[in-house]
Image: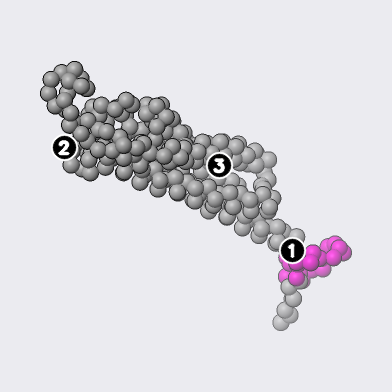
C-alpha cells in the first residue's frame, strides 16, 4: 500500500476513535449537568455541618450534611463539553473526507494540509487545557465532598452517601471520571492527528517538489536524452552525469 493511502487510513482510524471518545465526554457531562440542575460541580467550595436531623429528614437526632458555599464556574464544565462536541463533529466530517479521498485516490492540497496541521495543533492545546481543568476541578470537588479526606469514605463512595443537597449526586463520580478519562483520550487522539497531519503535509510537499523532476533525473542518470523538449521546472536541477 502506498504511503499516502496508509496515512489516510491511519487518519480515518484516528477520526473514528475521536468521535467515540468525544461522545464519551459529551454524554456524561450532559447527564451530570442535568442531575446538578445546570450547576457545575468542578471547583465548587463548601463545608460539612452537623444539624438536628428533624430539620432535614423529620426524624430525631443529629446528621451531617454538605453545605455548598459556591458552585463552580459554568465555564469549567462548558469548556470540556465544547471540546467533546467539536471533536465529534470534526471527527465525523474528516472521517467521511478521508473515506472519500481513499475511494478517489487523491489527497489534500498543500495549503489545505497546512491548515489541517494548524487546526489540529490548536485543538490539541485546547483539549489538553480542558483535560487539566476537568481533572483539577474534579479533585477540588472530591476534597469538598470528603472534607479533605477526613470523612470515613472515599470520593467514589460519596456518591452513594446522602449529601442532603438539592441536586442528584448519586452518579456524579462515575459521570465525571468517565468524562475525564475520555477527555484525556481525546487529547491523545488530537496529538496523533497532529502528527499524522504533519506527515501528510511533509509527504505532499515532497511529492509536489520531486514529482516533476523524477522522470528527468531518471533519464539523465541512465545517460538518455530527455524525451520531451519542454524546459525543466525552475526547481528541478539537472544532475550531472559522471563519466568514468
Out of 176 and 78, give the one closest to the viewer.
78
Secondary structure type for disc 3: helix
Q: Which residue is mark 1?
A: 213
Secondary structure type for disc 2: loop
Residue 35's disc number: none
Q: Earlier in the sequence, mark 2 or mark 3?
A: 3
Image location (x, y in percent) of residue 189: 48, 46
- Left or right, 45 with respect to 99, comes to left
Q: Give the CA distance from mark 2 to mark 1.
A: 74 Å
Image location (x, y in percent) of residue 101: 65, 42
Image location (x, y in percent) of residue 2: 61, 50
Residue 152's disc number: 2
Mark 2 or mark 1: which is in front?
2
What's the image's color scheme? one colour
Q: Decide: marks 2, 1 in contact (CB < 8 A)?
A: no
Q: Give the CA distance from mark 3 to mark 1.
A: 31 Å
What's the magenta bit mostly, secondary-structure-wise? loop
Q: Earlier in the sequence, mark 3 or mark 1?
A: 3
Amino acid at each position: 500500500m502506498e504511503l499516502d493511502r496508509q496515512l489516510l487510513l491511519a487518519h480515518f482510524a484516528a477520526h473514528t476513535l475521536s468521535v467515540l471518545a468525544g461522545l464519551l465526554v459529551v454524554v456524561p457531562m450532559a447527564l451530570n449537568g442535568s442531575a446538578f440542575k445546570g450547576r457545575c460541580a468542578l471547583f465548587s467550595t463548601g463545608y460539612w455541618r452537623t444539624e438536628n436531623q428533624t430539620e432535614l429528614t423529620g426524624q430525631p437526632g443529629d446528621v451531617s450534611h454538605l453545605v455548598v458555599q459556591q458552585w463552580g464556574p459554568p465555564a469549567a464544565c462548558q469548556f470540556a463539553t465544547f471540546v467533546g462536541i467539536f471533536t465529534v463533529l470534526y471527527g465525523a466530517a474528516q472521517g467521511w473526507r478521508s473515506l472519500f479521498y481513499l475511494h478517489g485516490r487523491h489527497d489534500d492540497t498543500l495549503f489545505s494540509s497546512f491548515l489541517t496541521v494548524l487546526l489540529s495543533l490548536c485543538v490539541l492545546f485546547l483539549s489538553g487545557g480542558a483535560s487539566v481543568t476537568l481533572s483539577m476541578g474534579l479533585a477540588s470537588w472530591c476534597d469538598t465532598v470528603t472534607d479533605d479526606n477526613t470523612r470515613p469514605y472515599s470520593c467514589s463512595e460519596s456518591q452513594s452517601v446522602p449529601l442532603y443537597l438539592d441536586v442528584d449526586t448519586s452518579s456524579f463520580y462515575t459521570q465525571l471520571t468517565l468524562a475525564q478519562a475520555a477527555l484525556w483520550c481525546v487529547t491523545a487522539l488530537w496529538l496523533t492527528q497532529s502528527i499524522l497531519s504533519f506527515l501528510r503535509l511533509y509527504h505532499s510537499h515532497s511529492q509536489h517538489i520531486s514529482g516533476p523532476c523524477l522522470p528527468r533525473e531518471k533519464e539523465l542518470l541512465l545517460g538518455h536524452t530527455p524525451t520531451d523538449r519542454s524546459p525543466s521546472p525552475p526547481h528541478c536541477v539537472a544532475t550531472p552525469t559522471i563519466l568514468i
